[in-house]
Image (spheres, rainbow, N blue to C red):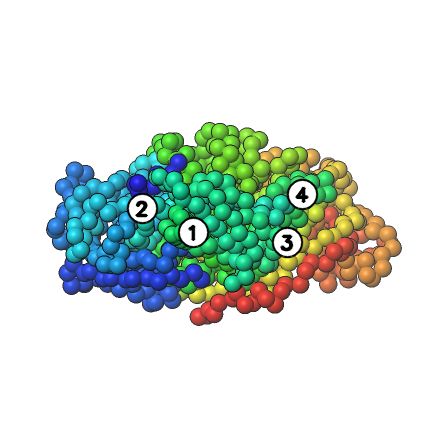
Amino acid sequence: MWTSVLWMLSPTKKMRFFSSAAGLMALVAVIHSPLTASAWEPKQAPLMTEWAKQVDPANPLPEYPRPQLVRSEWLNLNGVWQFQAGAAGDAVPAGQNLSGEILVPFPMESALSGVMQYHERSWYRRTFTVPEKWSGQHIVLHLDAVDFESEVFINGKSVGVHKGGYDPASYDITPYLNGKGPQELIVRVYDATDNAGEPRGKQTLHQGGIMYTSTSGIWQPVWLEPVPATAITDLKMVPDIDAGMLKLTVSVPGATEGVKVKATARIGKKVVGKVSGAPGAALILEVPKATLWSPTNPFLYDLDVTLTKGNKTVDAVTSYFGMRKISLGKVDGFTKILLNNQFVFEIGPLDQGFWPDGIYTAPTDDALKSDIQREKAVGFNMVRKHIKVERARWYYWADKLGILVWQDMPSYNSYTGHPATPDVPEFKSELERLVQTHWNSPAIIMWVIFNEAQGQHDTASLVQAVKTMDPSRLVNQASGGNHVGVGDILDVHSYPDPAYAVSENQAVVCGEFGGVGLAITNHTWAKGWGYVGAADGADLVSKFENFSELLSDFVQNHGLSAAVYTEITDVETELNGLYTYDRKVRKPDLHAIQAAIAASLGKYALTPVVPTSRKEGQSWHYTEIMPAPGWFTTNYSDVSWAVGLGGFGTDGTPGAVVRTVWKTDDIWLRRTFNPGALTPEQVGRLAFSVHHDEDVEVYLNGEKVYAANGFVGNYLRVPFSEAARHALLSGQDNVLAVHCHQTTGGQYVDVGIDECDVLVAPPSPSAALDAFELPHTE
């Protein structure tokens, strides 16, 4: 009955950059059966988290591993196992001690594994004893994730083979057990990483840039549980808030004649709904006047599911569910993402799920939880789980703490110099298993099929396949990749500034932006990089505030539904995190980031005082030859300069609207304007609208009032400084002068002035956010 579970930057800017540079707990019986006296010790990585010290090698990750299908009896097999490298054609080392040791479930490349080496082929071995009280039941072995191919042997006999580095495999090992004594468990592992075409996300054997240390072997929990001959193997829960019900399907393989399913929804001890019916049938569990799940109120119902035959209970599990809806709808003429039938702007970080000491595996459950706590603390309401799939307890914490999850499918990766032909059937198989093994999490609202065209293929058919499997969620055809007009989302990447696309029937989102690099001494993995640099935490805040200003405009005036900031933590040499890779230092001020995120939700009316050339070309005097000193003053004569329409630059520069080509290193611009009579209050609401690639200086009536280095990818709103307010002449002619200097890549400059009226003030950051903040060592 039980067998192996085989379920059915914008790239341009990135290439330019690289070319230039529970809760739930259950009764757990833990039995340790050391094969020999253990000599295991952890290794030392370039960085270690504080949680590394809390790892108990006798009982790592002791929490119940499957929070949405809980039984009271289970046996944790995590711990110190025997380990050794292997080779193709090896005989199974049954009854033999292996040469080394490893701490399961930490990948072999990690410091916490005690191995800290990659092996294409390897062997794992340990013994265990089945508790006597489990006698008469079926014993099921669970390997929650092994990267990439695994074969399980019990007492020297093969039980099954599983391929796929991100989904669980389960085996009924009852026929392979020998009596009541110690049983031998061996796992054979094969993982070619770069040298094969399976999904692997950001893993590589050639680390650097945006690619990181690989994960091979067992990297999620290994455990046993006893189940009856007729048992629940899966639940499928689909909330319908409009109808006030939960659609529930209970999978029970094998013969089910006379078997009945009973399900009870609870709030604590209070029963709020019941339903009964046949296994495999679509049951309707009514949930009247449901409390809806959202990031601000992550309310979860408890669920009890039992199998009965006659008057006897055959099997029983507990679970939970959230009542929430994700959909598309028209808001102010734009197609927007709706949560529970309301538009909520989604803003969150890229979360890559790497750890300096555990690589793919967080050292402890508190560590696993902590990144979501950090995301909530700074005011994010969404997270994009970036081309990685986490273990089940991460999704439990997302559900429990309340954060919307965009779940990426791990890509076949084509960014390294060691590409392999993608395994197309394997990709589809793993994509289907990703959906089927995670579709009960209320936090997950979107499946992202491809990232930046990495191994992208058969986009339309794969989107349709996922939409058919799970019509209750949104499907993103390709985040920053090739868009073919399918799915629910049109997703662009832009670094550093956010950007937006235009679509009539799809919700437009910015799936990546930001990337502000800041190295913190003693908290970096190695010499690293960022898409743009920050001088310190205050500079990082300033850049983030600029991003938020842009997002506010995009949400209000251009239909943007969501944006993803790169990123929550540094990862190896990538220093773009709001936190360091070891999670010990938060780089920006917490409340400043909270306020900036909140500001993106404000609504503003912009009245042009000096229009930009974004919609209509504006006339400027300009020269590409260095002018005489004082070129920016009011009494300077620019009659010899050329006259042209802005903006000035080269086609293809992100966000540029080029009307006059500028290809040299420098350009100087001047124009005269009269703002009319302005009250002091109006002057206080003025802001520059600036698009520059690269370094820019802005002068008003001879005074330097703004300067910035580097490039932006869109028009940035910059509130008038005190110097600008004093320099402006109300009701008189004013001279606006601009210098822009270019070094490499695309180039563009345009400047205007707007009066910014607040229509709806951004919400004040909630004091409740601070409850999610964790202590930091520095």
| Front one among 730 and 733 | 730
Q: Nearer the viewer, residue 642 or 117?
A: 117
Residue at figure coordinates x 51%, y 32% from the top left:
464
- Give the residue number, with chain letter if any, for mark 3: 289
- The answer to whether marks 2 and 4 mark residues whose Cβ atoms lie closer than 8 Å is no
Give me the C-alpha separation between circle 3 and circle 2. 38 Å
Separation of marks 1 and 3 at Cα, in angstroms: 25 Å
Q: Which mark is residue 559?
A: 4
The residue type indicated by label 4 comes to: Gly
Q: Are marks 3 and 2 in contact (CB under 8 Å)?
A: no
Camera-side mark, 1 or 3:
1
Q: Quadrant of residue 91?
A: top left
| Residue type (three-letter) at the residue carrying disc 1 | Thr
| Number of numbered discs overlaid on the protein picture | 4
Q: Is residue 219 left or right of residue 617?
A: left
Residue 81: quarter of image: bottom left
Q: Nearer the viewer, mark 3 or mark 4?
A: 3
Alpha carbon of mark 2 to alpha carbon of mark 1: how far?
14 Å
Which residue is at a point 75% across and 37% down the rendered structure image?
Answer: 616
Q: Categorize mark 1 by other alpha carbons within 10 Å: few (<14), some (14-19), many (20+).
A: some
Horizontally, residue 81 falls left or right of residue 271, namely left
Specify few, some or many for label 4: CA neighbours under 10 Å numbering under 14, 14-19, or 20 or more: many
Whichever of callouts 3 and 4 sits on the residue coming sooner in the sequence is 3
Foreground: disc 2 or disc 4: 2
The three-letter amino acid code for the residue at tag 3 is: Lys
The quarter in which the N terminus is drawn is top left
Give the residue pinned by disc 1.
306
Secondary structure of the residue carrying numbered label 3: loop
Kindly report which numbered mark, 4 or 1, lies closer to the viewer in this rendering. 1
Residue at point 34%, 45% (across, down): 230
